[in-house]
Amino acid sequence: MPTLVGVFAQPKDLGDVAEKLRTRGFTDLEIYSPVPSDELDVALDPGPSKVRYFTLIGGLVGAVTGYAMAVLMSEDWPLIVGGKPISSYAPYTVISFELTILFGVLMTVLGVFLVGGLPYGKFGKTDVAYDPRFSAEDFGLVVRCKERDVAEIDALLRAARAMEVSLVEA
Amino acid sequence: MTPPPAVSVAELMQPASSPADSQANRDLLSVMDNPGIGYWALLGLCVLVVHVAGAVWVYQVYEGLGVAGYAHPIFWGVYIVTFVFWVGIAHAGTLISAILYLFRSKWRNAINRSAEAMTVFAVLTAAQFLGIHVGRIWKSYFILPYPNQRGLWVNFKSPLVWDTFAISTYATTSILFLYVGLIPDLAIARDRTKGWRKILYTALALGWQGTSRQWKAHNRTVLHLSGLATPLVLSVHSVVSWDFAMSIVPGWHATIFAPYFVAGAIFSGFAMVLTVMIPVRRIFGLERYITDYHFDNMAKFILLTSLIVGYSYGTEYFIAWYSGVEPEKTSFWYRAFGPYWISAWIMIICNAFVPQILWFKKARLHLPTLFTVSVLVNVGMWFERYVIIITGLSREFDPAAWNVYTPEAPELAILAGSFAFFGMFFLIFLKLFPVVAVAEVKEIVIHEKEHKGEFWEHAHGYGETH
């Protein structure tokens, strides 16, 4: 499938042309960006990131685990001090709090791997459209299209102030 | 538009363009190049001291904790002091990375990586002391709740167990925070290195290409990790302070301990960041990225936290007097005028008075002054923990059992070893990973370009406009 890469200096130009291409029905797009950018985050995938569910689930599981572990283990080996109840929620909140954070963090990192698709590709191999300049200061827009659309997309990219447009795969 | 024939499609294909690079990449990755003789000498010294301290520790394990200066009832000595000290140092990294991230303080971008790395190494250093302190290292895992044939569980009401949970959570979080933040920079390094470095960075970068899917997940993750790390960082030193405050030892049993320790931790952590980053900036010529503006801001943080710490000292004395509780009053009198008076006054002068010079902008921008202040703050904060722990214990409950503790040579050797341990990891990190967050600095460079401003022309004030 023909693959075109447009190289841009400004993320805004790239975001605009990506939007334009999507409305014209060219949806097989990919963006390479050297820096995080709020506008590019939503250019191809509008809506909030799904990492949030990972964090939420991790945190809730951690909170429950913390209390459950402390209560079950102290009931299993009762240390009775001054005839007071064995389980005590104030100190166990510390354990529960720490596990909320721990499980939340572990699940969030799992989230960045699963949602972000990491690890990506074969070892040492980058995509054919990828170029080291996209880890410098340039932004790349990759369009995979039908052969008959190549010229049209090429023109669109150039019109959107692409510094250069190349066909990396015929 | 008529579709072009297949021939012209092939004509459109061009050879791959030569890789463009950015100045930020070159400048910041060049820190990792060509370690000089000074670097190797310093690293060699650190490794040597770590080994000497390791040998001393083996001697201590063989002989028993008697080689330390413990004198009944003082069984928490330099090891616990140093543990608390390093946990405190570990706080600046998370503060800079997480809390300033949530506040959208863009100036953190230039220093967050080094501060995060320091956090990780400081936590690792602190964790050593838990093992060193318990003496019988082979039993130290007893603190973890694990199923065993005796059917025993740990006491979850003990602050020492809370501490285990807090420190291990903090170590895990800070390592993952550092690594997740490093991934885009590892990809930058992967694209620009050869040989073993390329293999290393390719493996660690996990195929990062900066696609919008990757960035989107990454941005959200950094936000969530910051959100999780912020309450964590406050809880960790609170829990450490409860190791003391949950007891009924005069001088320890105070509700002010948690906020007082957290402020002290941030105070010492920022001081350590300055102590390390002032020489690093100079040696590697990073003036363009780590500007006086950053040091100025950090100095202001030190001033603020110094005021909080100084206020806490005052409050401790006031409450000791105002409570009317005789042991409290005696304990604090003893602290300032007893056998440990030198330590107490070092702590008060270094932490509460010396940083007041930072009210003056001239002092904040004069690096030798700032460096001296930061070193003195580190000294003062070590002595703060020494004063709290040792004077508290040496006049504990029963006057017949009161005693005076003096650190012995093995303890001081291991204390020196802890600095070498921290320094060794930091030096290795400097040459192996980008010590300034390249992608985050470039975010500012590109943002400036977009708004017509040329980054390099007014690099010295780039934080101020954001």
Image: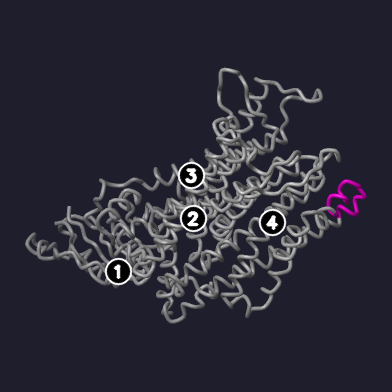
To which residue does mark 4 refer? B383
Q: Which residue lies at the image location 47% right of the left edge and 55% below the top edge?
A: B46
Asked if residue A7 shows in the view, the reply is yes
Instruction: Check disc 4 and give the amino acid type.
Output: Phe
Name the residue tied to disc 2.
B117
First in sequence: mark 1 vs mark 4: 1
Crowding near pointer 3: few (<14 within 10 Å), some, many (20+)?
A: many
Judged by depth in the image, the label closer to the viewer, 1 or 3, is 1
Name the residue type under label 2: Ala
Residue receiving disc 1: B21
Q: Is residue B64 above or below residue B229?
A: above
- Relative placement, left or right, of B112 versus B162 is left
Q: Check the residue under mark 2 and report the chain it is in.
A: B
Indicate whether B456 appears above or below B398: below
Within 10 Å of the Cα at label 2, are there few (<14), some (14-19), or many (20+) other Cα atoms?
A: many
Q: Which residue is mark 3?
A: A108
Q: Is residue A170 left or right of residue B197?
A: left
Quadrant of res B356: bottom right
Given the image, on which type of amino acid does mark 1 rest?
Asp
Amino acid type, callout 3? Thr
